[in-house]
Amino acid sequence: MRPATAGGAVALGLILLGCATVPYTGRHHLILISGKEETQMGLEAYQKTLKESSLSSAPVQTAMVRRIGERLARVADQPDFKWEFNLIEDDKTVNAFCLPGGKVAVYTGILPVTKNETGMAVVMGHEIGHAIAHHGAERMSQQLLVNLGGTALSAALSSKAPETRQVFGEAYGLGTGLGVILPFSRSHESEADHIGLILMAQAGYDPREAVEFWKRMEEASKSPESPMAKYFSTHPGHGQRIRQIQEWMPEALDYYRKAVPAK
């Protein structure tokens, strides 16, 4: 077998072995790294974030974030996750994230937009949706396929070569401002919206608040000084987002009614 053919066969084999299914949406995607490796990278990135940040000293808001997180974690059904929820003091960052393994952080800058506990559940459900769908691992797997040939890919994955770890590190590299961990594709953002809507409904939060939250995000983005323009450059437009959420709403309301039966 010629090297090119062998490399192609190896790549095809890895693709077949790496197929996984996203919870709730049922989408098939490619994951070429182990859950252990993904979780370790997430932990390293989370520890780096906390080391370089200041945790909020506001007890009420911090308790709210942790209360919401615990409710969402219960319905997310990820027994291998070691959940952690923190509120970071940074009023200029309108964002939140959930890293592989259940490491969640919310920035105080998003509090004026969430407004209430249910609004915060929209945000945290969305971010947890990214983690349980393994979007970060999917993006890294895509990058590995782009950067490495078939046989080279196999060797790099089996030996955990420095080049492979560099790809991981860059994928989970921490920046400043928005897009803290990794700019997901718009399709990933939509999928996280869908999963997050179901998670918040299962946790007993009214999913209809998601529409109101994204309307507030739209309003916040209109300010010339708002950082939200950068946020929307890598996310679905607010109009599209709201339309999609409304399409998913009947499904989410079914979960909500089961979680909170009418009295």
Image: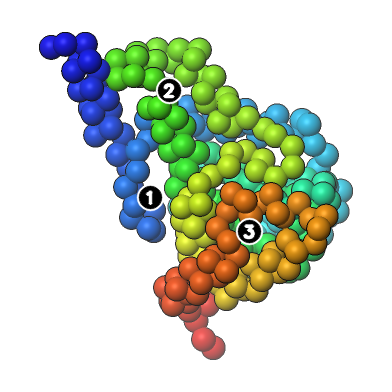
Circle 2 packing at 10 Å, graded few (<14), some (14-19), many (20+), is few
Residue contact at pointers 3 and 2, CB within 8 angstroms = no
Q: Is residue 153 above or below residue 45?
A: above
Q: For the residue marked with disc 3, what is the amino acid?
A: Val
Mark closer to the chain start, 3 or 2: 3
Residues 20 and 35: in front is 20
Q: Nearer the viewer, mark 3 or mark 2?
A: 2
Cα separation between marks 1 and 3: 19 Å
The residue identified by callout 1 is 22
Residue under the image location 53 percent in, 44 percent down:
184
Q: Position of residue 261 (x, y in %)?
A: 50, 81
Give the number of the disc on residue 147: 2
Q: Does residue 258 appear in the picture of this structure?
A: no
- Nearer mark to the viewer, of 1 and 2: 2
Q: Quadrant of the N terminus?
A: top left
What residue is rendered at 52% in x and 60% in y? 193
Residue that sits furthest to the bottom in the current view = 263
**Which residue is nearer to you in this view: 67 or 15?**
15
Residue type (three-letter) at the residue carrying disc 2: Asn
Estimate the x, y position of residue 42 in percent, counting from the top left: 57, 33
Residue tagged 3: 123
Would residue 83 be found to the left or right of residue 53 on screen? left
